[in-house]
Amino acid sequence: MTQALYWQKSTFSDGGDGNTCVELAAAPTTLHLRESDAPAIQLTTTPIPLTHLLNAIRSGPLRTTP
Protein backbone atom coordinates (compact mmCIF):
# COMPACT_ATOMS: atom_id res chain seq x y z
CA MET A 1 0.00 0.00 0.00
CA THR A 2 1.31 3.43 -0.94
CA GLN A 3 1.09 6.17 1.66
CA ALA A 4 0.02 9.64 0.53
CA LEU A 5 2.76 12.24 0.80
CA TYR A 6 2.30 15.53 2.63
CA TRP A 7 3.99 18.21 0.50
CA GLN A 8 5.42 21.34 2.11
CA LYS A 9 6.51 24.48 0.26
CA SER A 10 9.99 25.86 0.63
CA THR A 11 10.38 28.85 2.93
CA PHE A 12 12.13 30.52 -0.02
CA SER A 13 9.01 30.42 -2.23
CA ASP A 14 7.49 33.80 -2.97
CA GLY A 15 4.23 32.91 -1.24
CA GLY A 16 2.07 34.14 -4.11
CA ASP A 17 -0.57 32.30 -6.04
CA GLY A 18 1.84 31.22 -8.76
CA ASN A 19 3.70 27.97 -9.04
CA THR A 20 7.15 29.25 -8.11
CA CYS A 21 8.40 26.99 -5.38
CA VAL A 22 10.11 23.76 -4.46
CA GLU A 23 8.12 21.32 -2.38
CA LEU A 24 9.37 18.57 -0.06
CA ALA A 25 7.64 15.49 1.31
CA ALA A 26 9.17 13.11 3.83
CA ALA A 27 8.39 9.41 3.93
CA PRO A 28 9.75 7.00 6.56
CA THR A 29 13.02 6.31 4.68
CA THR A 30 13.02 8.72 1.73
CA LEU A 31 12.68 12.38 0.83
CA HIS A 32 10.75 13.57 -2.21
CA LEU A 33 11.28 16.91 -3.97
CA ARG A 34 9.32 18.51 -6.80
CA GLU A 35 8.69 21.84 -8.44
CA SER A 36 5.16 23.08 -7.97
CA ASP A 37 4.79 23.83 -11.69
CA ALA A 38 5.65 20.19 -12.57
CA PRO A 39 4.28 18.10 -9.67
CA ALA A 40 4.32 14.83 -11.61
CA ILE A 41 8.13 14.97 -11.83
CA GLN A 42 9.68 14.05 -8.50
CA LEU A 43 13.19 13.49 -7.22
CA THR A 44 13.42 10.77 -4.58
CA THR A 45 16.46 10.47 -2.36
CA THR A 46 17.53 9.72 1.19
CA PRO A 47 18.73 12.25 3.78
CA ILE A 48 22.49 11.63 3.49
CA PRO A 49 22.90 12.29 -0.28
CA LEU A 50 20.62 15.33 -0.03
CA THR A 51 22.70 16.67 2.86
CA HIS A 52 25.88 16.26 0.80
CA LEU A 53 24.29 18.08 -2.15
CA LEU A 54 23.08 20.98 0.00
CA ASN A 55 26.47 21.29 1.71
CA ALA A 56 28.22 21.39 -1.68
CA ILE A 57 25.84 24.11 -2.89
CA ARG A 58 26.38 26.16 0.27
CA SER A 59 30.16 25.80 0.23
CA GLY A 60 30.57 27.00 -3.31
CA PRO A 61 31.70 24.26 -5.71
CA LEU A 62 28.24 24.02 -7.29
CA ARG A 63 27.43 27.73 -7.20
CA THR A 64 27.13 29.70 -10.37
CA THR A 65 28.00 33.36 -10.59
CA PRO A 66 25.36 35.74 -11.90
Image (cartoon, grey):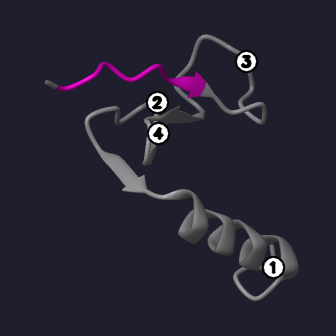
Q: Secondary structure at mark 1?
A: loop
Q: Which residue is mark 2?
A: 36
Query: In which quadrant is the C terminus drawn?
Result: bottom right
Badge 1: few (under 14), some or many (20 or more) residues near its Cα, within 10 Å? few
Residue 13 point in image, percent of width and height: 71, 31
In the displayed image of the protein, which residue is found farthest to the bottom?
61
Which segment did they paint magenta? 2-8
Query: Disc 2 and disc 3: Cα gap in Å?
Result: 12 Å
Q: Amino acid at mark 3?
A: Gly
Question: Position of 12 compared to 39: left or right?
Answer: right
Above or below for 58 versus 14? below
On whether residue 3 falls in the magenta region, the answer is: yes
User: Which comes before the other along the chain, label 4 or label 1?
Assistant: 4
SS class, disc 2: loop
- For mark 1, what is the residue? 65
Q: Mark 1 or mark 3, which has the lower sequence index? A: 3
Disc 2 to disc 1, C-alpha distance: 25 Å
**Residue 35 shows which numbered tag?**
4
Type of residue at label 4? Glu
Which residue does the numbered mark 3 point to in the structure image? 15
Q: Residue furthest left?
A: 1
Residue 63, by quadrant, is bottom right
Three-letter residue code for mark 2:
Ser
What amino acid is labelled 1 in the image?
Answer: Thr
Q: Nearer the viewer, mark 2 or mark 1?
A: 2
Secondary element at image label 3: loop
